[in-house]
Image: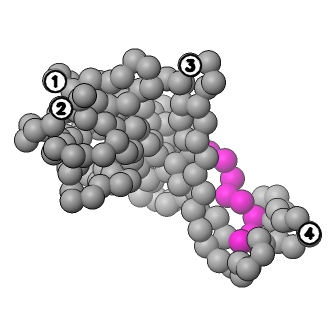
Amino acid sequence: MGSPATCGSGSPSPRGVAVGTAGQLRLAVTSKRNAVLSGDTGNIALTVGAAPPPPQDKIVLAVSSVFTPGSKSPTDGALVIPVGNTNIRVDFTALIKDAGTYNIGDPTIASNPNNAWIALLASSRSITTTANSNNQITIGIRSQAGAPATNLTLRVTSAADANVFGEISVPIRTTP
């Protein structure tokens, strides 16, 4: 591992934050030329004054299918979900590089006043897999009137090592 990063004056922590304080970092990147090309790192646990976690790409998640009447926007990759009481099926693929057992977390929604969005895991809560395998994860999602545009996040974590995980955050919105 590398040495801890320093801030401004050479201190290993930002002003006013104690060494040893834990937090989350998420980096998002969007292409300037094609907004469909976007992604983020998922949440990365950091501790002020400590070495950063090593990079990993052992679990890579992607949206593979959105079933009608839902759709995936061709311009920004958002899941577009009609308002109503019908669950829209969304399939994700998880490319898992190492054999083992992996836990699938409940899908979460970033800003969800009045529970206007409901997303439920329809797949098993765990996957036992061989190396370099694609695995399907299915969720159901529905929206109510007034549901704000926000993000849906899905996370897969190794049962053997919580530092090995993959996470995807996908924009969601209702049909216009």
Residue 96 at x, y percent in the picture: 46, 38
The N terminus, quarter of image: bottom right
**What separation in Å lies between label 2 and label 4 (alpha carbons)?**
51 Å
Q: Name the residue at 66% across, 47% down.
A: 55
Residue 57 at x, y percent in the picture: 58, 40
Pointer 2 or 1: first along the chain: 1
Dots 2, 1 in contact, CB < 8 A: yes
Q: Name the residue at 40% across, 18% down.
A: 74
**Which disc number belongs to residue 14?**
none
Does the segment drawn in magenta span residue 54?
Answer: yes
- Residue ranking furthest to the right: 9
Q: Residues within 10 Å of mark 1 (few under 14, many from 20)?
A: few
**Which disc number belongs to residue 69?**
1
The C terminus, quarter of image: top left
**What separation in Å lies between label 4 and label 1 (alpha carbons)?**
54 Å
Q: Label 2 is placed on what type of residue?
A: Pro
Residue 15 at x, y percent in the picture: 78, 75
Dots 4, 1 in contact, CB < 8 A: no
Q: Label 3 is placed on what type of residue?
A: Asn
Q: Which residues are magenta?
A: 48-56
**What separation in Å lies between label 1 and label 3 (alpha carbons)?**
25 Å
Residue 138 at x, y percent in the picture: 24, 37
Report whether residue 101 is seen: no
Residue of label 3: 34
Residue of label 2: 82
- Looking at the image, which is closer to me, 102 or 4? 4
Q: Is residue 42 above or below residue 163?
A: above
Q: Label 4 is placed on what type of residue?
A: Gly
